[in-house]
Amino acid sequence: MATWANCQIVKGFGKMVGPDLSEIGSKLSREAMFTSILAPSAGISHNYENMIALTEDGRVVNGVLVSETDDKLVLRTAEAIDLELDQDEIVDVKKSEKSIMPENLHHTTDQQGLVDVVEYLMGLKKKS
């Protein structure tokens, strides 16, 4: 599950695509963590919705909304690359029902590895 470092931050390490997981153990139950890993589109965190932009030249760009002005739209891809699009080149933008987190991420480990990751995440708590 080291793949998560490509798009999640834990204690200052990783890339900021999805929410910071540094205190996730204080926020989610064990069951909710398993659900978010096994079915990431079941509950997408606010401000981390995957946006889909279609450009005039036929490109489809997916990413989390970083910023939007009258002139520019900036989406952060799953690879943590910020893509800046001119608003006048965008044909359509919509919110995806699918999370930017891959649906099959749990396939990168065995069952015990998944349990170990959830136990690790449960230990990431807010310091009192």
Image (cartoon, rainbow, N blue to C red):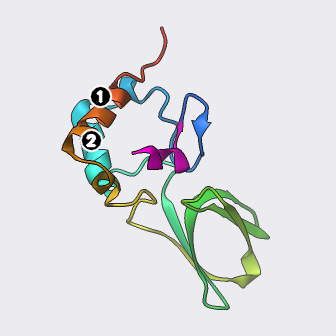
Q: Quadrant of the N terminus?
A: top left
- 23 or 90: nearer the eye? 23
Q: Position of residue 101 (x, y in %)?
A: 42, 56
Whether 34 is drawn above or below 85: the answer is above
Q: Which mark is residue 61?
A: none
Q: Which residue is mark 2?
A: 114
Whether 125 is drawn above or below 9: the answer is above
Horizontal side of residue 37 vs 62, given as left or right: left
Give the residue type that dot 1 points to.
Answer: Glu
Residue at point 42% right, 20% down? 125
Q: Which residue is mark 1?
A: 119
Q: Position of residue 24 (x, y in %)?
A: 41, 30
Question: Which residue is situated farthest in the top direction here?
Answer: 128
Disc 1 on helix, strand or loop? helix
Residue 46 part of the magenta-drawn span: no
Residue at point 33% right, 50% down? 43
| Highlighted magenta segment, given as a residue range | 1-9
Give the residue type that dot 2 points to.
Answer: Leu
Determine crowd level at label 2: few under 14, some 14-19, many 20+ residues with C-alpha closer than 10 A: some
Residue at point 33% right, 31% down? 28
